[in-house]
Image (cartoon, rainbow, N blue to C red):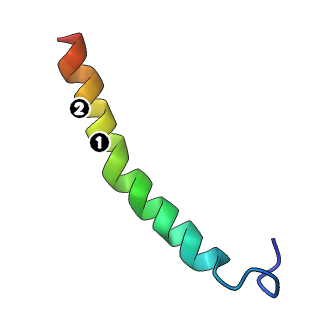
Amino acid sequence: MPDALHPNAAGMAKLADCVNTVLMPLLANRSIGSAA
């Protein structure tokens, strides 16, 4: 999406990246815990 139409696109991408960085280990730990 063009930045002219969505000036927050870069910020949203950074936010999504941070969320993935935080949530992925939590989800992995949860599945490991339930599998164990």
Report if the CB atoms under discs 1 and 2 are less than 8 Å apart.
yes
Q: Residue 16: horizontal and vertical position, in percent?
A: 50, 61
Quadrant, the C terminus = top left
- Disc 1 is placed on an element classified as helix
| Residue 9 location (% of width, % of height) | 66, 75
Residue depicted at x 32% and y 53%: 22
Quarter holding the N terminus?
bottom right
**Mark number, residue 35:** none
Q: Is residue 9 left or right of residue 13?
A: right
Q: Which amino acid is tagged 2?
A: Asn
Q: Is residue 18 above or below residue 35?
A: below
Please determine whether, in this image, residue 18 is positioned above or below residue 8: above
Q: Give the side of residue 5 with respect to residue 36, left or right.
A: right
Q: On residue 29, which mark appears?
A: 2
CA neighbours of label 1 inside 10 A, class few (<14), some (14 to 19), many (20+): few
- Tell me the number on the disc at residue 25: 1
Above or below: residue 29 compared with residue 3: above
Q: Give the residue at x 47% y 61%.
A: 17
Residue for point 23% across, 32% down: 29
- Local crowd size for mark 2, using a 10 Å CA cut-off: few (<14), some (14–19), many (≥20): few
